[in-house]
Image (cartoon, grey):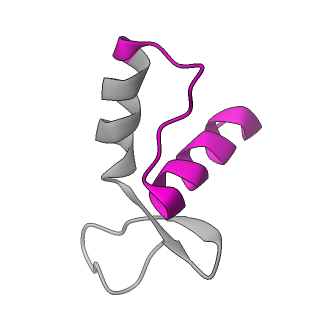
Amino acid sequence: MEKQEYVKLLQYLTDLKLPEDIVKKQVRNMKSQARHYLVREGVLYRRNCQDPNQPL
């Protein structure tokens, strides 16, 4: 994941606000991608499907 995508996704998951500079297609993509990530103590983790309590 590129740094810019990481920052936007982290911002979306912490504030639940979408960046102003993205288009409708990117909004849909970001929301679907956000389902696979979580934020703990300001760090972005990819969800572990086999064991949801332990992120990758």
Q: Above or below — where is 54 with respect to 11? A: below
The quarter holding residue 1 reads top right
In the orientation shown, which residue stands out farthest toward the left?
A: 50
Q: 22 left or right of 24?
A: right
- Residue sitting at x 47%, y 46%: 17
- Residue sitting at x 56%, y 33%: 19
Residue 40: image location, x then y, percent: 54, 79
- Residue sitting at x 60%, y 19%: 21
Q: Above or below — where is 9 with respect to 55? A: above
- Residue sitting at x 32%, y 86%: 53
Residue 32: image location, x then y, percent: 29, 38
In the orientation shown, which residue stands out farthest toward the right?
A: 3
Magenta region, main secondary structure:
helix
Q: Which of 15/38 is in front? A: 15
Residue 25: image location, x then y, percent: 35, 13
Q: Above or below — where is 55 with respect to 7? A: below
Residue 36: image location, x then y, percent: 35, 54
Range of residues picked out in magenta = 1-25
Q: Which of 13/2 is in front? A: 13
Q: Is residue 53 in the magenta section?
A: no
Number of marks in picture:
0
Q: Which of 47/18 is in front? A: 18
Q: Is residue 24 in the magenta section?
A: yes
